[in-house]
Amino acid sequence: MKINVQSKKGLKTTLSIYVDKNDIKKKLDNRLLELQNEIDLKGFRKGKVPPLIIKKQFGKATYGEVIDKVLKESTTKAIQEKKLKIAGQPKIDLKTFGEGKDLNFELQLDLLPEIKLQSFEKYKASDYSVKVGKDILDEKLNNLIKEYKSFEDKKTDTKSELGDQVIFNYQATVDGKEFEGGKGEGVALELGKDLFLQGFDKQLVGVKKNDSKKITTTLPQNHPKKELANKQTVFECKITNVKSPKENKLDDEFAKKLGAKDLSELTEQVKNQITNQYNLALNSILKKEILDQLEKNHKVEVPQNLIDNEIKMSPSNPNTKSDNKNTKLIEKRIKLGLILNEYGENNKIKVTEDEIRNEIQKQVKSMPGQEKFVFEYYQKNPSATQHLQSSIYEEKIINFIKSKIKLTKKELTIKEAEKMIASFNNNNNPKSRLEVKKKETQASKSKKISKK
């Protein structure tokens, strides 16, 4: 095989490749011999069909199969020999081919740019954290007391009031007929919260233990059984208990009810929850600071075919100004992806199978009751696993960069943090935030391309 550089302009390179006809003939003959053991023809025992007959019947198709394989092998070998990093799929232009002829074709390639990474000394960013004051902690803990109410039995002859908890059994009917799912036992409602059916619990105000109460209401429009949607329904209720709210005390016993060892541990858990909530948003601000500097400090020629492919996948917009803006954003995303990938490759950053499994486990824990669905989703969708791997890969690159650049630690109050996050969100409207998210996945796309 001979490889010549036909032309080179910017990121576009054309290679001219020649494959000797004798090499092709050997591959063709070998394939015909393989077919001799695979083909059944009437009048011949399997494996005994003469090669000439096989060639007569299957020659053209076999030649096409062999040429296709030669083209793929030659393309891969040429790219490897010339040590080229390609962007996207090569284009093949056949010049001469045919049985008994040399194969000559041109390989048109879009190349990834060479990126000269800048020194980490050029970068600096602010590493924000929040200070959770006692007033904020007290407010959150008091909200927990209100949210996780306790109730104690009322006297049998005492009527229920708004805020009380009523426990009851019921049988529901529509047009006098019972229906599937229309029966319940031990249902507990906090009166006034309207969590069952609209207006239902208000009709339970004034009931006592052991009372019977008929409640008329309407089933919701989105009822699972369409024939029952918006139907007037009668609930025959038997009141089994009435309880009044009991004031919780912020102490070790209350903490234990929420799964903590004591009040001190519950307080620390609440503090960590608040801190993590704000840090997640503040880390996005830090990340954007880094990405903006990466984009600004590197001159990178973005392959046009990558931009074109992204535009094809983007929703069409007849507005020319919007199109131009969208194209610039796409170009910026790809540029950042290429830069991040270069940092990853230069510093031998890799993603292990354990890291992927751990990330899936995190998702499983965050979706209780849907564990099987999450596992099956990744098993049946290799692209989702690849996307997850790419996200982890990019996050590792960002964390690596954070460890190398100058970070100024800044502690914010909750109010300062909220103001900063609000400003960040206002400057990154829903469309822009989506584009930032895409930016986060672009490194993965570029990584795939560079490894082809």
Image (spheres, rainbow, N blue to C red):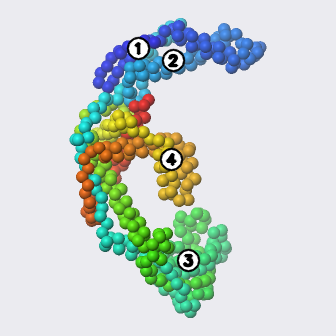
- Amino acid beneath label 2: Val
Task: Count neighbours of disc 2 (C-alpha within 10 A) and say few if under 14, some if 14 to 19, many if 20 or more.
Answer: some
- Amino acid beneath label 1: Ile
Above/below status of 192 relative to 328: below
Q: Mark 1 or 3 closer to N-term?
A: 1
Q: Mark 1 or 2 closer to N-term?
A: 1
Residue drawn where x is 48% and y is 53% of the image: 362
Mark 1 sits on what residue?
Answer: 3
For discs 2 and 4, the disc positioned in front in the rendered view: 4
**Residue 195 or 248: which is nearer the viewer?**
248
Check disc 4 and report its element: helix, strand or loop.
Answer: helix
Disc 3 to disc 2, how far (Cα)? 73 Å
For this orientation, the residue located farthest to the left is: 122
- Amino acid beneath label 3: Ala
Q: Mark 3 or 2 closer to N-term?
A: 2
Disc 1 to disc 2, how far (Cα)? 14 Å
**Callout 1 touching callout 3 (CB < 8 Å):** no
Mark 2 sits on what residue?
Answer: 70
Above/below status of 433 relative to 411: above
Residue drawn where x is 39% and y is 36% of the image: 348
Above/below status of 186 relative to 2: below
Q: Mark 2 or 4 closer to N-term?
A: 2
Mark 4 sits on what residue?
Answer: 357
- Residue 395 seen anywhere in this rendered image of the structure: yes
Q: Quadrant of residue 218?
A: bottom right
Disc 1 to disc 3, how far (Cα)? 79 Å
**Residue 74 or 249: which is nearer the viewer?**
249
